[in-house]
Amino acid sequence: MKSAVAGVLYAIAVLMLTTALGLAAICLTGFPYLADVDYLKIPETTGISKSEALQNYDAIMDYLSPFSSEEFSLPTLSYTEQAKGHFADCKYLFNVIYILGGAAALVLILLSGRRSLSKSTLRVSGAVTLAIPAFIGAALAVNFDRAFELFHITFFSGASWIFNPDTDAFIKIMPSTFFMHCAIFISLFWVAGAIAQLTAGYSKYRSRRF
């Protein structure tokens, strides 16, 4: 029972850290948007050129950076006060994820240095960590639109995340499929974290830490 509880708590810390790492990778590298702008044929379907789409996407990512203190603005595409409020909420959520990820990293470093962190704990933690992306993947496969809606209902108030493309033109360059690809990309970090824990948990070699 003790190993199971410790494993669940360790898994939560791993999930917080890997979520922050995945989100940071999206913001820093431009992936998957750099691929999606061509794969989803965004210029052809929206009438907005690739260079303009990338310019406005970069402006959004720059604003969402925890190191940015600039007001939200887009270089060419229209947006409303509702959009400004929504992106402010997104920035707050991103910052919370980064803070929790940093705290989780510290906790994992401290726990990993303790001999009490057993292989059984790592096996439980790895299994729990792996179960999360499996559940998310199943939800996305069954009904992504509903999963996308539930996410926004959970983390944003009212209909603040629903936009009219005539007044908030930026939404044209960010189709829902792009957000699905972001979710899949972050889930790969979860899977990597789970594999690392399971590998350590089932390793035949003894370690001073495990």
Image: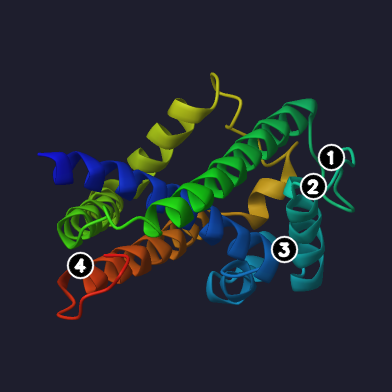
SS at mark 1?
loop
* Foreground label between 3 and 1: 1
Residue that extends furthest to the top in the rendered view of this protein: 158
Q: Tell me which numbered mark, 2 or 4, is placed earlier along the sequence.
A: 2
Question: Of the residues shown, which amino acid type is indicated by label 1?
Answer: Phe
Which tag, 2 or 1, sits closer to the chain's start? 2
Query: Badge 2, how many Cα within 10 Å: few under 14, some, many 20+?
Result: many
The dot on residue 63 is: 2
Whether residues under marks 2 and 1 lie with C-beta atoms below 8 angstroms apart, the answer is: yes
- The answer to whether residue 175 is left or right of residue 154 is right
| Rendering coords of residue 176 (x, y %) | 50, 52
Residue type beneath disc 3: Gly
Separation of marks 2 and 4 at Cα, in angstroms: 40 Å
* Quarter occupied by the N terminus: top left
Marked residue nearer the N-terminal end (2 or 3): 3
Mark on residue 47? 3
Question: Element type at marker 2?
Answer: helix
Closer to the camera: disc 4 or disc 1? 4
Q: CA–CA distance between discs 3 and 1?
A: 24 Å
Say which residue label 4 marks.
201
